[in-house]
Image (cartoon, helix red, strand yellow):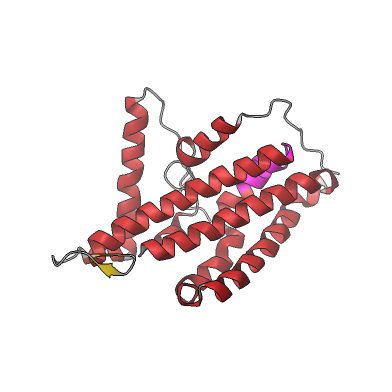
């Protein structure tokens, strides 16, 4: 049985959604899983599929840990969390391969790497192992939605400006900025979006958060 303390005060749904989507956005605010985010977001379609996969794994893993947290011993909780994540990643991996084989051919490798994404295991450790099922499900959905939003936004900017297309459909005849399709362009795009969110927070009178770097 887990020896982790259980919080007595359960956060409100609106608070959880706001934190996951903006205040503690996994990519733009916490700087988690930046490396795979850069590798996948060369198009909107790839970013969307990757974001949906992470959202599904995050929600299902959070729900599983919340249900069985009283049976998970503190000393083996991290290996157990990893096994739970791997179970759901394998499930999503097979579903995506069957439903969208063309997209899977491009991002299939990164779907398997979701097992090591810092954002997922951190929410299991910080939230799902301490809160009830309902709140854990909402927290998982909020953080997954924040990651999905980041992936789609980054993918849209990089595809439109770097390739002159959107969802594979050509939009402009002007010469695209090819740098944005390269990995360096991905980090550049994420950096600008991080700066924009920090600027918004400063305008709202909030203190900037410390980010953890390129984890996962």
Q: Position of residue 123 (x, y in %)?
A: 62, 45
Residue farthest toward the top in the current orientation of the protein: 205
Report if residue 138 is visible in the image: yes
Q: Quadrant where the N terminus lies?
A: top right
Query: Toward the viewer: 57 or 81?
Result: 57
Residue at x 58%, y 68% (from the top left corner): 112
Query: Toward the viewer: 80 or 10?
Result: 10
Whether 103 is drawn above or below 65: the answer is below
Q: Magenta region: which residues?
A: 122-132
Q: Position of residue 127 (x, y in %)?
A: 66, 39
Q: Position of residue 98 (x, y in %)?
A: 57, 75
Residue at x 76%, y 33% (from the top left corner): 5
Whether 205 is drawn above or below 25: the answer is above
Name the dominant secondary structure of the magenta segment: helix
Q: Quadrant of residue 151?
A: bottom left
Q: Would residue 123 be found to the left or right of residue 184 on screen?
A: right
Residue at x 76%, y 50% (from the top left corner): 77
Q: Any magenta on residue 19?
A: no
Residue at x 82%, y 38% (from the top left corner): 3
Query: Toward the viewer: 65 or 211?
Result: 65
């Amino acid at each position: 049985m887990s020896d982790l303390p259980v919080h007595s005060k359960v956060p409100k749904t609106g608070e959880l959604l706001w934190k996951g989507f903006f205040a503690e956005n996994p990519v733009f605010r916490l700087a988690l899983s930046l490396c795979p985010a850069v590798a996948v977001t060369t198009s909107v379609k790839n970013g969307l599929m990757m974001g949906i996969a992470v959202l599904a794994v995050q929600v299902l893993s959070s729900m599983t840990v919340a249900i069985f947290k009283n049976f998970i011993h503190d000393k083996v909780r991290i290996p157990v969390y990893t096994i739970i994540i791997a179970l759901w990643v394998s499930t999503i991996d097979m579903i995506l391969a069957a439903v969208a084989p063309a997209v899977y051919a491009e991002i299939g490798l990164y779907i398997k790497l979701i097992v090591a994404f810092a954002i997922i295991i951190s929410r299991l450790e910080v939230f799902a192992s301490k809160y009830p099922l309902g709140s854990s499900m909402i927290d998982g959905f909020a953080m997954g939605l924040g990651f999905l939003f980041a992936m789609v936004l980054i993918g849209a900017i990089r595809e439109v400006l770097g390739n002159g297309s959107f969802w594979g459909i050509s939009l402009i005849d002007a010469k695209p900025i090819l740098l944005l399709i390269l990995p360096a362009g991905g980090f550049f795009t994420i950096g600008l979006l991080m700066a924009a969110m920090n600027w918004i927070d400063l305008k709202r009178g909030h203190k900037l958060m410390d980010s953890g770097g390129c984890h996962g």
